[in-house]
């Protein structure tokens, strides 16, 4: 299981470097032909991880419901984010994964509400959710790289 968390933390480190190496304007830019931006994709990975792992386990998310609602599947940027909001997202990149690992190690995930994802796979337990989340974040990393190239 440490392997899955290691992958997640390494992906999050890459996302953090994108935040640190791009201006606020670049992070908020929606290039022509795209429907979202770099910072939306990064925040989306956090919101989806919390939904897949915590909410589907019947547990409260580590982030606000407002953040989940703003960055969940089917949403898009409604406005530019402030530097303070970007800083909050940057801080959540690691704290959410570290707390998830701690909670997983402490076996707090006792229940799981099955959920069928876009790929038509059905997640039946938290381990599958954690593993699928890495796949999901990989898709968004690819999308972010395309966005970066389009800036």
Image: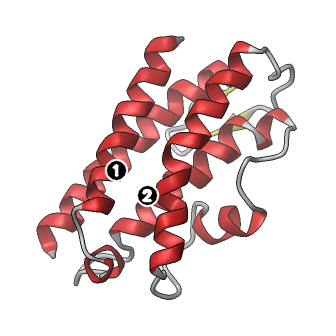
Q: Secondary structure at mark 2?
A: helix
Residue 53 at what x, y percent from top left? 69, 35
Q: Is residue 4 above or below residue 137?
A: above
Does any portion of residue 122 appear in the rendered image?
no
Q: In the rendered image, which quarter is residue 66 located in?
A: bottom right
Tell me: residue 56, above or below residue 85.
above
User: Residue drawn 52% across and 30% down?
Assistant: 132
> In the rendering, which numbered label is found on residue 57?
none
**Displayed quadrant of residue 147:** bottom left
Disc 1 on helix, strand or loop?
A: helix
User: Quick one: 7 or 142, which is closer to the camera?
Assistant: 7
Is residue 83 toward the left or the right of residue 50 in the image? Answer: left
Q: Is residue 98 above or below residue 140?
A: above
* The C terminus, quarter of image: bottom left
Sequence order check, earlier mark of 1 and 2: 1
Image position, residue 138 (x, y; %): 35, 40
Residue 110 appears anywhere in the view: yes
Residue occupied by mark 2: 42
Q: Residue at x 53, y 73 (%)?
A: 85
> Residue tagged by mark 1?
15
Check if mark 1's residue and mark 2's residue have beta carbons within 8 Å. Answer: yes
How dense is the environment of label 1, judged by Cα within 10 Å: few (below 14), some, or many (20 and up)? many
Q: In the image shown, does 140 or 60 lie closer to the viewer?
A: 60
Image coordinates for residue 93, horizontal then vertical, percent: 49, 47
> Does residue 59 appear left or right of residue 26 in this picture?
right
Q: Residue 43's x, y, as percent? A: 50, 60
């Amino acid at each position: 299981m440490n392997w899955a968390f290691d992958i997640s933390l390494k992906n999050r480190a890459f996302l953090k470097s994108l935040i640190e190496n791009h201006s606020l304007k670049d992070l908020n830019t929606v290039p022509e032909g795209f429907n979202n931006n770099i910072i939306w994709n990064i925040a989306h990975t956090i919101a989806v991880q919390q939904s897949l792992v915590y909410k589907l386990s019947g547990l409260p998310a580590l982030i606000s419901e407002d953040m989940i609602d703003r960055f969940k599947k089917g949403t898009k940027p409604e406005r530019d984010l402030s530097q303070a909001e970007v800083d909050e997202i940057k801080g959540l990149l690691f704290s959410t994964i570290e707390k998830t690992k701690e909670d997983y190690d402490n076996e707090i995930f006792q229940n799981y509400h099955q959920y069928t994802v876009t790929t038509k796979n059905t997640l039946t337990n938290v381990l599958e959710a954690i593993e699928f989340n890495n796949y999901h974040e990989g898709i968004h990393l690819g999308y972010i790289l395309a966005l970066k190239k389009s800036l």
